[in-house]
Image: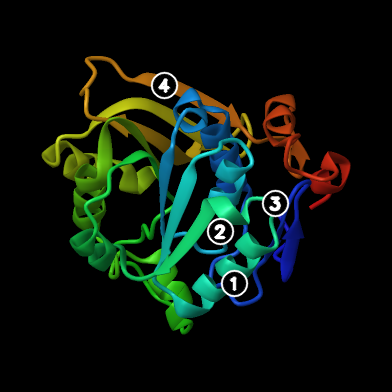
């Protein structure tokens, strides 16, 4: 996916020139899966942890009537998300809080029907010169322990939490989640093609601690950059022209 200063979807536009982390194919698929879930569609309150450009919040708003609270630490990204929200058809559903999620959590008692997050995930990894990008990608500002604790504190009794992580980070987060009383109900692997292994997992958690976890795999491309039919169907409510997307 090209990293332009903006990305136009069918019903909204993401301006991202001021954001350290841009729109990615993985995040779009993640947002589409959240949006088509019954848990999201029936949610009255949604929390987006680490909102970035506001992509996930906007994809959720396109598919539900609930109120969405998006929390973002980076000030410039927050301002960009506010603009993206204001320019969308769902401005009255969306609220942006410029804060560390730990501070938000310490001052809020609210429970949410659905919590979504594409969080920082690198642990003890090499960092580049871009400090804002480092903050967005590394767990220094939001550890998996803190993330799991925040989710547990704010997830409604019958709510669901959706998290996108690299494969190598998944077990670290699940260990923290289990400590906070959260159970894995579904794990969806993302792989670039049938010749590749999974590079991301989408984790769906709740408080029920199920005995068995549903497992699925989504193959993104037949041969990069051409999307599989499964991906095309997922993204058809959002991408303006899948023929153009195939060329990105």
Q: Which residue is drawn at 44% across and 27% down?
A: 39
Sort mark 3 into few (<14), some (14-19) or many (20+) by Cα contacts within 10 Å: few
Give the mark nearer the N terminus: 3 vs 2.
2
Q: Estimate the spatial distance between the alpha carbons at disc 3 and disc 4, rounded to whole Å.
A: 35 Å
- Observer-side mark, 1 or 3, equals 3
Sort mark 1 into few (<14), some (14-19) or many (20+) by Cα contacts within 10 Å: many
Q: Residue at x 29, y 29 (%)?
A: 184
Give SS at disc 3.
loop
Horizontal and vertical percent position of residue 40: 48, 33
Give SS at disc 2.
loop
Give SS at disc 1.
helix
Q: Estimate the spatial distance between the alpha carbons at disc 2 and disc 1, rounded to whole Å.
A: 8 Å
Q: Residue at x 24, y 58 (%)?
A: 108
Q: Cβ–Cβ below 8 Å for labels 3 and 4?
A: no
- Observer-side mark, 4 or 1, equals 1
Give the mark nearer the N terminus: 2 vs 1.
2
The residue where tag 2 is placed is 54
Horizontal and vertical percent position of residue 99: 35, 71
Give the mark nearer the N terminus: 1 vs 3.
1
Q: Cβ–Cβ below 8 Å for labels 2 and 1?
A: yes
Q: Tell me where residue 124 sits by quadrant.
A: bottom left
The residue where tag 1 is placed is 80
Q: Which color scheme does this rendered protein use?
A: rainbow
Give SS at disc 4.
strand
Q: Farthest residue toward the bottom? A: 129
Q: Tell me where residue 79 sits by quadrant.
A: bottom right
The disc label shown at residue 215, or none? 4
- Observer-side mark, 2 or 4, equals 2
Nearest to the observer: residue 116 or residue 158: 158
Considering the image in quadrants, where does the N terminus appear? bottom right
């Amino acid at each position: 996916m090209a990293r332009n200063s903006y990305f136009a979807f069918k019903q909204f536009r993401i301006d991202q020139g001021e954001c350290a982390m841009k729109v990615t194919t993985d995040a779009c698929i993640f947002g589409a899966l959240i949006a088509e879930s019954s848990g999201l569609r029936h949610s009255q309150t949604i929390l987006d942890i680490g909102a970035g450009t506001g992509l996930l919040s906007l994809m959720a708003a396109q598919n539900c009537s609930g109120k969405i609270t998006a929390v973002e630490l980076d000030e410039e990204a927050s301002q960009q998300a506010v603009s993206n929200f204001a320019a969308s058809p769902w401005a009255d559903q969306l609220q942006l809080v410029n804060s560390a999620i730990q501070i938000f959590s310490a001052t809020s008692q609210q429970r949410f029907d659905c919590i979504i997050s594409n969080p920082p995930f690198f642990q003890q990894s090499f960092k580049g010169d871009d400090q804002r990008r480092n903050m967005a990608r590394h767990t220094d500002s939001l550890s998996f322990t803190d993330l799991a604790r925040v989710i547990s504190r704010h997830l409604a009794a019958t709510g669901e939490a959706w998290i996108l992580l690299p494969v190598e980070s998944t077990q670290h987060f699940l260990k923290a989640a289990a400590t906070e009383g959260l159970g894995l109900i579904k794990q969806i692997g993302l792989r670039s093609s049938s010749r590749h292994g999974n590079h991301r997992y989408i984790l769906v958690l709740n408080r029920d601690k199920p005995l068995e976890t549903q497992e699925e795999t989504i193959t993104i491309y037949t041969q990069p950059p051409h999307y599989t039919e499964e991906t095309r169907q997922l993204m058809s409510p959002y991408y303006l022209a899948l023929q153009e997307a195939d060329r990105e």
